[in-house]
Image (spheres, grey):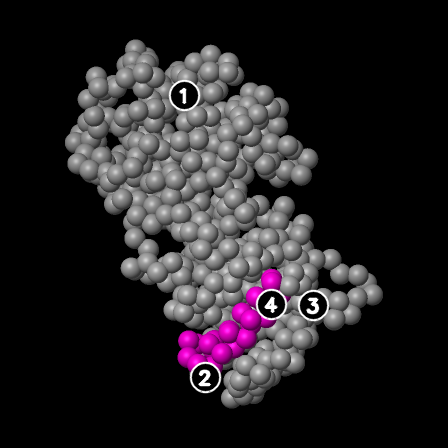
């Protein structure tokens, strides 16, 4: 999913796409990347009128419709016929105003508009009723869903229902969304794809699959994670001229990561540096038959800039790992005692890739936990640590909790469910990834990276969302690669919060670069040269 700002903002002379590109000098940059709950967005909407930034809420509706028309004129300049499907509430009102503006004789686009209402328009109230009357007074007509043929249109606008939805689409609402999805036509959703939760990114059944979504007033926190990645298409943000002060007065719930900003945290090297200056990462894992996991983590760590990478694994794995990547220092470890000399040399630890959940893995994790607890209790920091994969499963099974806020944990949904002892490890349509990561933070204290579409990172009270990455990365070893990247950044002495965010973005951006050659058939090795490229750009 890509995100762009395409904002109608009368207070700014700059195009907002340019504003994103020159974010370092534009103080609106932070506000564009704040994400809010649906309730908070409604409050911002209300305050725009209450504090006199606009005369009426209907003015905001007109701005929203104009921003949509501007987008259609730019991106679909070749089309002649659009179908706007309206439901209820202000989302429908936006659709009615768009219909009026698009069909006006003096409008450059001057499109043939077919407007569909799935409810009796007489039931509309407030601004939506006003917008409907404006459309009818301009000579427009309203059609039913039954008399609509989507094959005859060039573009569909989804104006069914907005951010207030908290249940499944039913009856004619369900039918309309299904017909839109089956049309094979490009779809623009107004503010949010109908049927999608603005707070969680989940659905309660069917939802509209948009080609583009133009979201208004403020970014919605659920629209960059979970199922939203499937339904929103390319995201565009139109602020409608919201005052900067309102973005700071109303508390945001999450922040979108932005690569150009995050990449500033990449470690710099002195021309006189040696390998020891760039950190020594110890990767612990690779039980019998799982040498590939620690090898992937090790190579990713080298490509992410670690000066030295040691791997503590089963003796049987030494030849397999060394023959594939001789730059890795591989040590056969059969007992926790064998770890001692390696722990003393490391500046960071990554434990979990291929660790297994048997006695060997449990003993090694127990030794690392004792070291981390000793550091925390005595307020010393010998090493930083990232915990992943089977190390998380062992923690869940035995209820291990380390009271150290500086440890990074990288669970996917199943591992997170086990850590929280949920009854199922598989995501459901009701899943709230934000609630889950908060619960993980509360129970285990550290920095959590909840992997998946729209990876979340919790930092104190703030949650960061990664808008990068793609479905091609759903293949073996991707999590091990991320662990190696984060471990390398920790070894290079980046603060844990920076290492977590930068590691996630670096990993996802590498996946996006690799996907330019195709998403199907992408393997983790395809990311490794891209990691090196990104760290040197």
Do the CB atoms of the residues marked 4 and 1 lie less than 8 Å apart? no
Q: What is the C-alpha distance between the residues marked 4 and 1?
A: 59 Å
Q: What is the C-alpha distance between the residues marked 2 and 1?
A: 62 Å
Please report the bounds of the magenta region as a residue range: 355-377
x%, y% of residue 157? 34, 32
Q: Quickly name the residue at label 2.
A: 288
Question: Looking at the image, is mark 4 or mark 2 nearer the viewer?
Answer: 4
Q: Quickly name the residue at label 1.
A: 61
| Dot 2 alpha-carbon crowd within 10 angstroms: few under 14, some 14 to 19, many 20 or more | some
Relative side of 119 to 163, left or right: left
Do the CB atoms of the residues marked 3 and 2 lie less than 8 Å apart? no
Question: Looking at the image, is mark 3 or mark 1 nearer the viewer?
Answer: 3
Q: Quickly name the residue at label 3.
A: 279
Q: Which mark is residue 374?
A: 4
Question: Is 199 above or below relative to 101?
Answer: below
Relative side of 82 to 14, left or right: left
| Mark sitting earlier along the chain (4/1) | 1
């Amino acid at each position: 999913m890509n995100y762009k700002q395409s904002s109608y903002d009368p207070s700014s002379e700059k195009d907002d796409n340019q504003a994103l590109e020159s974010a370092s000098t534009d103080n609106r940059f932070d506000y564009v990347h704040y994400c809010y709950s649906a309730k908070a967005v409604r409050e911002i909407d209300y305050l725009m009128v209450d504090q006199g930034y606009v005369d009426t809420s209907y003015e905001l509706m007109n701005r929203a419709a104009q921003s949509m028309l501007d987008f259609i004129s730019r991106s679909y300049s070749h089309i002649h016929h659009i179908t706007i499907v309206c439901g209820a509430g202000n989302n429908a009102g936006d659709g009615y105003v768009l219909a009026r503006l698009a069909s006006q004789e003096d409008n450059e686009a001057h499109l043939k508009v077919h407007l569909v209402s799935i409810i009796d328009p007489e039931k509309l109230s407030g601004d939506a009723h006003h917008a409907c009357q404006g459309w009818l007074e301009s000579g427009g007509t309203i059609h039913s869903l039954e008399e609509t043929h989507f094959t005859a249109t060039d573009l569909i606008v989804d104006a069914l229902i907005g951010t207030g939805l908290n249940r499944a689409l039913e009856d004619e609402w369900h039918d309309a969304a299904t017909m839109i999805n089956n049309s094979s036509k490009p779809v623009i959703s107004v503010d949010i794809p109908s049927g999608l939760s603005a707070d969680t990114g989940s659905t309660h059944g069917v939802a509209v699959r948009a080609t583009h979504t133009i979201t208004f007033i403020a970014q919605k926190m659920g629209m960059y994670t979970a199922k939203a990645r499937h339904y929103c298409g390319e995201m565009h943000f139109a602020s409608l001229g919201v005052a900067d002060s309102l973005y700071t007065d109303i508390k945001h719930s999450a922040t979108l990561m932005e690569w150009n900003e995050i990449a500033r945290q990449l470690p710099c090297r002195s021309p006189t540096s040696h390998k020891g200056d760039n950190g020594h990462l110890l990767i612990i894992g690779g039980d019998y038959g799982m040498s590939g996991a620690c090898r992937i983590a090790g190579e990713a760590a080298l490509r992410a800039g670690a000066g030295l990478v040691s791997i503590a694994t089963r003796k049987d794995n030494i030849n397999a790992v060394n023959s594939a990547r001789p730059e890795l220092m591989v040590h056969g470890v059969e007992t926790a005692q064998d770890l001692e000399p390696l722990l003393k040399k490391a500046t960071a630890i990554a434990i979990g890739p291929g660790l297994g959940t048997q006695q060997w893995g449990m003993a090694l994790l127990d030794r690392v936990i004792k070291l981390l607890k000793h550091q925390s209790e005595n307020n010393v920091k010998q090493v930083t640590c990232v915990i992943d994969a089977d190390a998380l499963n062992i923690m869940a099974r035995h209820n291990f909790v380390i009271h150290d806020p500086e440890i990074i944990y990288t669970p996917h949904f199943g591992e997170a469910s086990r850590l929280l002892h949920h009854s199922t490890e598989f995501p459901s349509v009701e899943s709230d990834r934000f609630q889950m990561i908060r619960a993980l933070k509360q129970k285990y204290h550290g920095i959590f990276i909840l992997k998946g579409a729209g990876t979340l990172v919790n930092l104190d009270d703030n949650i960061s969302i990664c808008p990068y990455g793609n479905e091609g990365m759903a293949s073996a070893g991707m999590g091990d690669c991320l662990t190696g990247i984060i471990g390398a950044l920790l070894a290079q002495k980046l603060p844990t919060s920076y290492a977590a965010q930068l590691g996630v973005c670096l990993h996802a951006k590498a996946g996006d670069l690799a996907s330019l050659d195709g998403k199907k058939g992408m393997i983790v090795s395809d990311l490794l040269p891209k990691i090196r490229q990104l760290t040197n750009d």
